[in-house]
Image (spheres, rainbow, N blue to C red):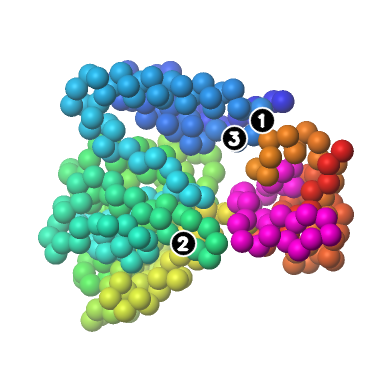
Amino acid sequence: MPANLTPEYLQAEKAFKEAQTSEEKLEALRHMMAVIPKHKGTEKMRADIKTRISKLTEAIQKSGKTGRRAMIDHVEREGCGQITILGAPNSGKSSVLAALTNANTEIAPYPFSTQHPIPGMMSYEDVQIQLIDTPPLAESMTPTWLSNTARNADGILLLVNLAEADILSQAEMLLNEIRKGKVEPVREDGEDERVGWFRRPTIIVGAQVDQAGALSRVRELRAWVGDRFPVVILSTATGEGLNSVRRELFQLLRLVRVYSKMPQKPPDLTKPFVVKQGDTVLDVARLVHKDFAENLTFAKIWGEGKYDGQRVKTDHAVHDGDVLELHLK
């Protein structure tokens, strides 16, 4: 089965070949693992990458402090997607992470209280999305490894503090700092024409909307952003906007939930199979069982805009909320 490698994977592979240090090689391998297509045609490649990551990690850990630092600043991926939270000092990143997830994080009224990435799992209906709190971005003070965290994630939550008067200066500084690491925040993912650059889908979240003057700054921010990014507002104090942020992050990742059904039985709506927008019945079959893809002949589908039990081919694109009944040879 062909691997059908994406341009982003090939770019990550090139970065691995050009890496000069063990830490750079490890980050490149992790990125390769994060973006490689997951199907039977890449099983051997994924196993090889995992082996190389394990061996290189062990070698780095034995080498001393630099290796241990590389391990501290890496977060293993969990859930259906990974979102990096980026913001200026005292923008409220830790409070937002705590409000959206179950993470135990230090919330302090002084800047730079977060020194290492802190993960938490956010629930959106029946899926889990990983959020990562990070040290603040600040001109000439942004940690060098932070660009790797943004690059390896599936998307970015860019946090600005609506209680501050210089809202546009905040946003502009954040974009500039992210771009220094060759990461381009965009509304929708895609390939970047510049060598070594990565595009990451981004939303801007305005925190502390309950503070005086915040609503006028929201209007100012939205006028400045235009249609470049979605803008969502929230208050961790009142809970306003938290569900809107959860929904926007789910949409940012372009996730599609598909539920399974056995013939003559009701569908299992407790645990969806999660794929990306544009994926097909065949992609879902690969998640159900590795052998299903080879033996799948057709499927019956239930969903919006379809009649119940409509028969579809294996290349039929699925949509969020679809129910599939897979039929094998």
Distance between the alpha carbons at the discs numbered 1 and 3:
9 Å
Distance between the alpha carbons at the discs numbered 3 and 2:
25 Å
| Secondary element at image label 1 | helix
Q: Decide: is 310 above or below 276.
A: below
Where residue 56 appears, x then y in whole percent?
36, 20
Distance between the alpha carbons at the discs numbered 2 and 1:
29 Å
Q: Decide: is 280 above or below 187.
A: above
Kind of residue indicated by mark 3: Pro
Question: Of all residues shown, which one is farthest toward the left?
Answer: 110
Horizontal side, residue 90 vs residue 7: left or right: left
Residue at point 47% right, 26% down? 50
**Toward the viewer: 295 or 13?**
295
Where residue 17 appears, x then y in whole percent?
43, 18
Kind of residue indicated by mark 1: Lys
Residue at point 48% right, 36% down? 34
Where residue 247 appears, x then y in whole percent?
50, 66
| Disc with the residue nearer the chain's start (3 vs 2) | 3
| Secondary element at image label 2 | strand
Q: Is residue 284 magenta?
A: yes
Q: Which part of the image, by quadrant, shows the C terminus?
A: top right
Horizontal side, residue 139 vs residue 52: left or right: left
Residue, disc 2: 123
**Toward the viewer: 40 or 157?**
40
Residue, disc 1: 40
Residue, disc 3: 37
Q: Are marks 1 and 3 in contact (CB under 8 Å)?
A: no
Q: What is the magenta range?
A: 258-285
Horizontal side, residue 88 vs residue 271: left or right: left
Question: Of all residues shown, which one is farthest toward the bottom?
Answer: 212
Mark in the foreground, 3 or 2: 2
Mark 1, Cα crowd under 10 Å, few <14 / some 14-19 / many 20+, is some
